Image: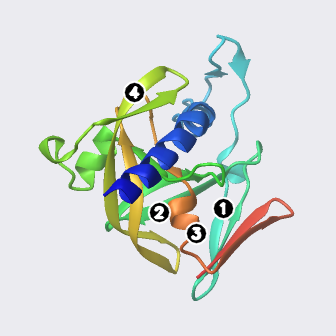
Amino acid sequence: MLVRTAIFAAVAAVLATQIPSMIQLAQKDLSPPPAPGTAAVSGNGAPSPSVPASQAPQQASLSSGRVRIDADSRGHFQASFRINGKPMDGVIDTGASTIAINETAARRLGFTGNGLDFRYTVNTANGGTEAAHVVLDRVEIGSIRVTGVDAFVLRDKALSGMLVGMTFLQKLKSYQVADGQMTLAQ
């Protein structure tokens, strides 16, 4: 029991140092695109360029057990996943120790409010927030399927989307980044 608590405390400490930057990236990357004819507005109120759909990141299955994801204009790897059989978009972040999802997404995945134990505190760009540990039955992207993946559920105000970290990536045979593309292999 002490070993499990120590491991979890180490994960929580890593999350506390990494979540603020991941949340900022996710909020920028996962915000809905502006309607045609309108300008996007950045957090400081200044207009920011929108990316045409033709330049949106693409993901392609190379072969059975291999997926390639193109980086977006900022170098982020956004992709469409299936979590416990449900479609979700996420940002792959090799600096994140776990998958992080918000409460709304957790409910969509079948984790009920009563079943979530928000006993862990992590620091984010918005300050400290509560987190609950869950295990995702399966995480899929293209032809890759991984089972039994640890994740944290954060309050909606702390995280607007999904960040996919090392608890997913470490279960793969390999992952590599080269020439603006991330290749995942199982």
**Residue 167 visible:** yes
Could you tell me how far apart the alpha carbons at marks 3 and 2 are, in whole angstroms?
Answer: 16 Å
**Mark 1 lies on residue:** 58
**Mark 3 lies on residue:** 170
Amino acid beneath label 3: Gln
Q: Is residue 164 above or below residue 176?
A: above
Q: Secondary structure at mark 4?
A: strand
87 vs 31, left or right, is left
**Mark 2 lies on residue:** 81
Q: Secondary structure at mark 1?
A: loop
Task: Indicate which disc, 1 or 4, sits on the residue closer to the N terminus.
Answer: 1
Amino acid beneath label 2: Phe
CB-based contact (under 8 Å), mark 1 and mark 4:
no
The quadrant of the image that shows the N terminus is bottom left
Amino acid beneath label 1: Gln
Classify mark 2: residues with Cα within 10 Å, few (<14), some (14-19) or many (20+). Answer: many
- Image coordinates of residue 125 in percent, x first then y, are 55, 24
Classify mark 1: residues with Cα within 10 Å, few (<14), some (14-19) or many (20+). Answer: some
Could you tell me how far apart the alpha carbons at marks 1 and 3 are, in whole angstroms?
Answer: 23 Å
Task: Indicate which disc, 3 or 2, sits on the residue closer to the N terminus.
Answer: 2
Q: Quadrant of residue 146?
A: bottom left
**Mark 4 lies on residue:** 129
Classify mark 4: residues with Cα within 10 Å, few (<14), some (14-19) or many (20+). Answer: some
The quadrant of the image that shows the C terminus is bottom right
CB-based contact (under 8 Å), mark 4 and mark 3:
no
Q: Residue at x 23, y 47 (%)?
A: 107
Task: Indicate which disc, 1 or 3, sits on the residue closer to the N terminus.
Answer: 1
Q: Residue at x 45, y 45 (%)?
A: 9
Tag in front: 1 or 3:
3
- Image coordinates of residue 119 in percent, x first then y, are 28, 36
